[in-house]
Image (cartoon, rainbow, N blue to C red):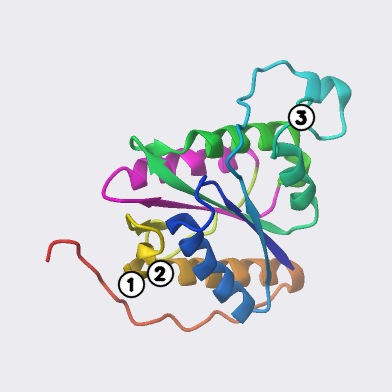
Amino acid sequence: MKVLLINGSPRKDGNTQTALNECAKQLKANDIEPVMAWIGTKPVRGCIACGKCREVGGGRCIFDDDVTNGIIDLMEQCDALIIGAPVYWGQPAAQAMALQQRMLYAGGAAFKGKPAAVITVCRRGGASAAFQTLQMPFQMCNMPIVTSQYWNIAYGRTPGEAALDTEGMQTMRTLANNMAVMLKMYATGQAETPAPEEWMPMHFIR
């Protein structure tokens, strides 16, 4: 079984990738293969509601000049999805939203019914609003949402700093454990639930 993890940040090795790496490591520990994809630094088109993807068929966007169709190709080979994105102005990075909207609309058949989750990363605030924004489309695509012990949020400013957010990283591991259980339940009808880690609360006022 495979999980596609999308880094929706233009920073390839920033805090969004740090959070995704924690998930990937825990997925591997559960014998689930992580498949990483990076959105890159080139523009990602927004949907223009042309409807050509429906007219032409094939489950691809008519615009083939960015990462969207390549991501749909990857998702056809995967069993679940995690989208990670940084927070800009209290919202998910625009390119992450543009990708999500186009890939789910044009390539919906590759996503429907597959478990999904969102990760958002910020310096200080806006992560929960961004988290909600990216999570909502999954519910319109019949994608079961995988939960964790908290909202899937990590905090950090400089690249890699999110690794110091101990509760955030634990949340990523718990998310990966829960996704593994769900995938195994779907595949076999049974799965062992991992023992929860002892809670590691972390507050940001020192």
Residue neighbourhood size for the residue with mark 1, other residues' Cα within 10 Å, grouped as few (<14), some (14–19), many (≥20): some
Q: Quadrant of residue 186?
A: bottom right
Range of residues picked out in magenta? 113-141
Q: Residue at x 47, y 63 (%)?
A: 18
Q: Judge whether residue 140 is colored magenta.
A: yes
Residue identified by numbered label 3: 61
The C terminus, quarter of image: bottom left
Circle 2 residue: 169
| Left or right: 86 in relation to 143 | left
Q: Residue at x 58, y 66 (%)?
A: 179
Is there CB contact under 8 Å for labels 2 and 1? Answer: yes
Membership of 203 in magenta stretch: no
Q: Position of residue 135 (x, y in %)?
A: 50, 44
The residue at 65%/40% (across/down) is 141
* Number of numbered discs overlaid on the protein picture: 3
Kind of residue at disc 3: Cys
Residue 186 is labelled as none
- Labels 2 and 3: the sequence-earlier one: 3
For the residue marked with disc 1, what is the amino acid? Thr
Q: Earlier in the sequence, mark 1 or mark 3?
A: 3
Front residue of 60/38: it is 38
Q: Is label 3 in a helix, a strand or a loop?
A: loop
The residue that label 1 is drawn on is 166
Q: Residue pushed farthest top?
A: 50
**Residue at (51% x, 47% y) in the render:** 9
Is residue 146 shown above or below 40?
below
Q: Is residue 80 left or right of residue 73?
A: left
